[in-house]
Image (tube, rainbow, N blue to C red):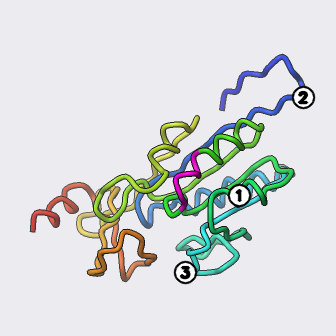
Amino acid sequence: MFLEKSNNTNAKNGWIEVIAGSMFSGKTEELIRRLRRSKIAKQRVEIFKPHIDVRYSTDEVVSHNANSIVSTPVETSGNILLLCGNVDVVGIDEAQFFDTGLLDVCNQLANQGIRVIVAGLDMDFKGKPFGPMPGLMACAEYVTKVHAICMRCGNLAQYSHRLATEEARIMLGEKSEYEPLCRDCYTGLQKV
């Protein structure tokens, strides 16, 4: 990363990093990796996730590969500001499940000199931009798009195809409810 130093030697540079992609693409894995490196560097780190994400744990961010890191579940994005205290780095998982105020929260934290690392689905199961993710990607200094492998053909996958018949936009799930698909396989299923 190339950061320009300001003339004020006491000022901290804050920024926003977004890790986006489909289900099973390694978003949470990458978030945990970056947060662990920050802890190794003796930075003060706080990690948040939406309170509705209880798939693997109520108080940890957990990847599909069972790697985990302690987190604080919150009901709204505004709670992050109340709970983050004196920190250097804020991690946020499953950003797509937060309210649209998450963009303002992340900008406020970055403006205070905090490194903000956000992970989330960029599209829902219908292939539409999901929650606050498009705005976060637009405002972020760094965006990492990660891909899964298509379960039908083996190409890079960017879509989260829902196997279940549930039509609600928000449905927590795992491999029995979702599969990653490439563009061709996903659009082929949409035509059926």
Residue carrying label 3: 55
> Mostly what secondary structure, the magenta segment?
loop
Residue type indicated by callout 3: Arg
Dot 1: element: helix
Dot 3: element: loop
Q: Position of residue 12 (x, y in %)?
A: 81, 33
Distance CA(mark 3)–CA(mark 2) = 42 Å
Residue type indicated by callout 2: Asn
Query: What is the quadrant of residue 167 in the picture?
Result: bottom left
The numbered disc on residue 10 is 2
Which comes sooner in the sequence, label 3 or label 2? 2
Give the residue drawn at x 49%, y 59%.
96
Distance CA(mark 1)–CA(mark 3) = 21 Å
- Which of the two discs, 1 and 3, sits closer to the camera? 1
Give the residue drawn at x 65%, y 61%.
32
Asked if residue 10 is positioned above or below residue 100 in the image, the reply reads above
Q: Are marks 3 and 2 in contact (CB under 8 Å)?
A: no
- Which of the two discs, 1 and 2, sits closer to the camera? 1
Q: Position of residue 182 (x, y in %)?
A: 27, 58
Distance CA(mark 1)–CA(mark 2) = 25 Å
Residue type indicated by callout 1: Ile
Q: Is residue 124 left or right of residue 50?
A: left
Q: Is residue 177 left or right of residue 172?
A: left
**Along the line of sight, the residue nearer the viewer: 102 or 26:** 102
Q: Position of residue 31 (x, y in %)?
A: 62, 57
The quarter of the rendered structure image containing the N terminus is top right
Q: State the extent of the magenta-drawn residues as a range.
A: 98-103
Give the residue drawn at x 62%, y 73%.
51
Give the residue drawn at x 59%, y 81%.
56
How packed mark 2 is, by other alpha carbons closer than 10 Å (few <14, some 14-19, many 20 or more), is few
Residue carrying label 1: 80
